[in-house]
Structure formats: structure tokens, C-alpha cells
Amino acid sequence: MKYLKFLLIVIILFPLSSVNAEENDKRNKITKNLRCLICQGQSVYDSDSEFANSLKIVVDKKLQEGLSEDQIYEYFKNKYGEWILYDPGLNKNTYILWLLPILIFLIGGAIIYKSFIVKK
Amino acid sequence: MKNKILPFSVIIIFGIIFFIFYKGLEDSKIYTPDVNIKKEIPVFNIKEFFSGENVKSSGIFELDKFYLLNIWSSWCVPCRQEHPLLMNLNLENKLNIIGMNYKDNLKNAENFLKELGNPYKEIFIDLDGTIAIEWGAYGVPESFLIYNNEIIKKYIGPLNQELVDEINLFIK
């Protein structure tokens, strides 16, 4: 009987803890990509300011409501603008940021091709 | 001719990079929110300060009336500075000032109002700061001028006489 009780407790607790762990991972991932607006240079995850603590609660609430990661980013972007995201999407303000490395890579490749391969 | 392409490309690439970094220097590194926003007010449930009753946001703001939502706290020093201005603004019949008490000890908040006066038509409590986030606020004090369920203007930091004059112009 004792073993049965123990087994029952393990069965009940095990899935719960794994669900919690999954949610925690997701929460940590999201808060690491959110900028703390009053303590710049720090993510919401790293910060312990009043603002960051409230933001963490909101992220938890939104996750419980069943929102996806992208929907949560969209929610905060809507409230505070693109600045709150550490990993901004491609838009008119950030296209240089995204396209410049590709451009430099292509120009660099062209130079190497011209000066080394064509010369041969 | 071929020999000239390489230095020429290098100069152009450095030029572009220099231009981008130079432009980046001009941008503010401090979060500067857009204050002239025409945004719908958020939907939320909140506790009333004195009764502790839960109230829906739709029951707070009526159409065709001006509201000033002021986020305040007894521990916030700039709130103390702007409080006399709110007391003056309260004399304007056209403006309804709504208070949102942010992450505060209720006893301290009550003492704050006893000491400096209560300019608010209604006061609500945001104990964990999540409702302030719904409003897009990130600290105290912050004020939002609202008309027809829309935020007309956001005031970050304490109000001053200049801003109060501006609010008076809006509600005229």
C-alpha cells in the first residue's frame, strides 16, 4: 500500500513538474529577448527593477492565457515599440542591419573571385 | 584598371560602414516613447482603491468626456511635486482625473492623500504593476489624456505648469 501511494504521488507530480519546467524555459527565453526600458543594457530577465518584475508577471500571464512567443513579442511591440525587442524583425528601420552583412559578403566574394580566381 | 577595383571597393565599404555608425551616433540610446499617440485605451479589470471592488475598464471611461489617468505612488518623490498641479487641474470641470496607485502600500497611499489632498474622481490599485504595462507605462509618475476612449497624449514624468497649460488647451 505504501509503495502504491508513493507511485501515485510520483505519477501525479512528474508531469506537473515537467510542464512547469517547460513554461519556465519559455518564460526565460522570452524575457531574455525583452529590453528593460529603465535599466538599459540589461534584459528583463537580468533586471530586478520594478518595471522588469511587472513585465515578468505579464509574460507569465500571457503564457498561461496560451499566447505563443511571437504573439507575446507582438503584444509588447504594440505597447512599447520595436525598441523593447533585442531581436528586431525586418522592417524599414532595420533593413540595413539585416542586408548589410549579405551585401558585404557578396562584394567581398566578388573581389576574391575577381582578384584570385579570374587571375589564374 | 583591375588593380583599382580592390581599393575602390574597400573605400566604398568603409564609407558605408562609417555612414551607418555615424547615423547611429545621432540616435538616442535612451528609450524615448512616442507621446503623441492615438491609441485605443486598453481593456482590463482593476480594483477600486477605497472599496476594493473589481471594476471593468469599460465602466470607468465614458464617451465625450476628457479624462486624465495619473499613475502615482506615495513612495515616488516626483509625484509629490506634481500633486499641487493635479489639485489645481481638478478645479477644471471638464476634466476627470483618475488615479492609478502603482505598487504601493495602501496605508501610505491614504496618508499621502490626507496630507496633500485628493484630486482624483476615482482611484484604482495596480499592486503588481501589470495594468501600467497594459497602458504602455514604464514608471511613475505618468499621465494619459483620454477622450472618446482614445489616448490623445502621454505625459512621462511629473507634470509642470507648461504641460498643465497644454492640457487646458486640449480640453477647451
Image (tube, rainbow, N blue to C red):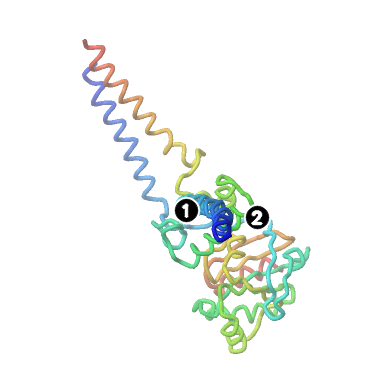
Across and down, in percent, residue B50 comes to: 69, 81
The part of the image, by quadrant, that contains residue B144 is bottom right
Is A51 placed above or below B27 here?
below
Residue for badge 2: B38
Residue for badge 1: A28
Across and down, in percent, residue B86 comes to: 62, 78
Q: What amino acid is labelled 2 in the image? A: Lys
Q: In front here: A45 or B119?
A: A45
Label 1 Cα crowd, 10 Å radius (few <14 / some 14-19 / many 20+): some
Pointer 2 chain: B
Residue A84 visible somewhere in the drawing: no
Q: What amino acid is labelled 1 in the image? A: Asn
Q: Which mark is residue B165?
A: none
The part of the image, by quadrant, that contains residue B46 is bottom right
Is B119 placed above or below B154 here?
below
Residue under the point 64% across and 73% down? B125
